């Protein structure tokens, strides 16, 4: 049972680091992003779920960032929940 819990914790931590790298490359404060997801959901929650799915599917951080940067919808919504994000 402990091995299963350790594996789960490890995967959660790996995703956290993956998301942190994505946020960093997008110049988004990950802490602010987490708070916004928790309190407002919407596009931020959809983006987090999409980042998680990309991570699970084996996409690289650079692939995820490139897709986000190329998506007009996601790019326009970034400013609404992450005021520190820049092009």
Image: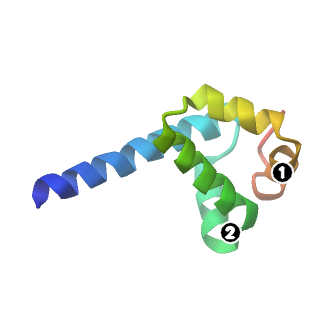
Provide residue 6's location: percent of width, then percent of height.
20, 52
Q: Which residue, as the protein is rendered here, is positioned at the far bottom?
A: 39
The secondary element bearing badge 1 is classed as helix
When the figure is inspected, residue 38 is found, relative to residue 62, above or below; the finding is below
Q: Nearer the viewer, mark 1 or mark 2?
A: 2
Say if mark 1 contacts mark 2, CB within 8 Å.
no
Q: Which residue is mark 2?
A: 41
**Which residue occupies 88% across, 42% down?**
72
Provide residue 15's location: percent of width, then percent of height.
45, 45
Q: Residues within 10 Å of mark 1 (few under 14, many from 20)?
A: few
**Which residue occupies 83% across, 44% down?**
75
When the figure is inspected, residue 74 is found, relative to residue 63, above or below; the finding is below
Side of 40 where 60 appears, left or right: left
Counting residues from the start of the chain, the first of labels 1 and 2 encountered is 2
Along the viewing direction, whichever of 34 and 64 lies nearer the viewer:
64
Q: Which residue is mark 1?
A: 79
Side of 69 where 30 appears, left or right: left
């Amino acid at each position: 049972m402990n091995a299963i819990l350790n594996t789960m914790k490890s995967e959660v931590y790996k995703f956290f680091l993956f998301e942190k790298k994505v946020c960093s490359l997008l110049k988004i404060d990950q802490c602010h992003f987490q708070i916004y997801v928790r309190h407002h959901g919407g596009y931020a929650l959809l983006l987090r779920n999409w980042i998680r799915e990309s991570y699970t599917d084996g996409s690289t951080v650079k692939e995820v960032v490139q897709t986000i940067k190329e998506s007009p919808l996601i790019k326009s919504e970034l400013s609404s929940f992450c005021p520190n994000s820049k092009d």
